[in-house]
Amino acid sequence: MGLDADAETVYRLMLTHQDWGVEELAAHLARPESDVREALDRLAELNLLRRSLQAPGGVRPVSPNLGFQLLLQRQQAELLAQQQQFAESQAAISTLLAEYAELRTGERHGVEYLQGIDAIQARLEELAHRSTTECLSFMPGGAQSAASLEASRPLDEQLMRRGVRVLTAYLDSVRNDTPTVEYAHWLHDNGGEVRTVPALPLRMVLFDREVALLPVDPDNTKKGAVQLTGPGVMTALVALFEQVWERAAPLGSVRDRDEAGLTAQERELLRQLTQGATDEIAAKKLGIGLRTERRIMSELMARLGARSRFEAGVLAAKAGWTD
């Protein structure tokens, strides 16, 4: 009922020695006065103490008959509050599940669910055909598959031929993949712009700042996509793209080390580490192989003089490497 051992001991003593103060209680228990004061604070919180009329400034214990009745009432109130919270959570979950069920059946409030790769590709073709100003894309996952590049080429070609501005952000790791680099150069040669960053939040395509396609599950884009419209959500997504694009580096540029001697990829790996990411998750975020991620991590730990990943995270934070 919230009454810990120290508070109970002090309460029992006060019932039998109501004239004792903090000093006497502490002396009898052979405990620091600070411990007694903490116990008194807990008893006051549980309404087991009252101000003493006989000793102004002092306190007296509430009788056990009343005190434990108050504790039971307090516990009952907490249980009722938990039951109410549980009922409200159930209602919220039911509403969410109902909305999700509607989402899966089609369009609702500017949201449309697309299931399967064919449906997504068909919608991309439709939106590319309708686009008139720009197409902004995040392409995470590192090296792009041959199938993905093959599917993207006719759409990008159609857009650029009509003068639509095509901006594409890849991961830094694609710089080591010949097919993706060749495709990026083809985009650049035909009027598109390509930049790279150490990590991307998710796969995303924005058309004319009016329509967005995002994966239902960022970790498995084959599960389907969500088409979003509406000024509020589009403003947020465009702002996200512009923020990432601003710190991205053109594909043809050289990624220099910063003042701490770190590459952008190394700094991002350390940031992932401090956020608790495993080797597997960090490697996936950076679009690199697990062996490559562990090699980079081992080199960083050696530079920091760390003997564990946890210690490396602490030392990196102290050195300002994760800012």
Image (cartoon, rainbow, N blue to C red):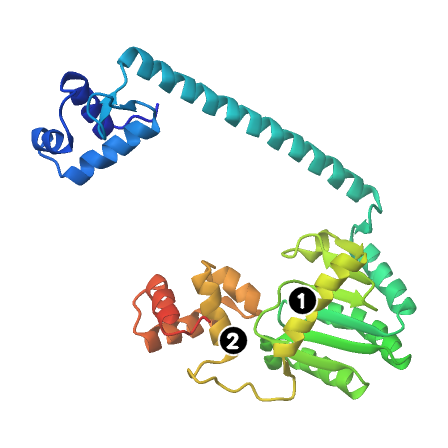
Residue 98 falls in image quadrant: top right
Which part of the image, by quadrant, shows the N terminus? top left
- In percent of width and height, residue 158 lies at 88, 76
The residue where tag 1 is placed is 240
Q: Is residue 12 above or below residue 137?
A: above
Number of marks drawn: 2
- In percent of width and height, residue 145 lies at 69, 69
Q: Is residue 175 above or below residue 203?
A: below
- The structure residue drawn at horizontal position 91% and vertical position 68%, both measured from the top left corner, is 129
Q: Is residue 67 left or right of residue 284?
A: left
- The structure residue drawn at horizontal position 52% and vertical position 78%, both measured from the top left corner, is 264
The reply to whether discs 1 and 2 touch (Cβ–Cβ < 8 Å) is no
- In percent of width and height, residue 80 lies at 51, 22
The amino acid type of the residue labelled 2 equals Gln
Dot 1: element: helix
The residue where tag 2 is placed is 265
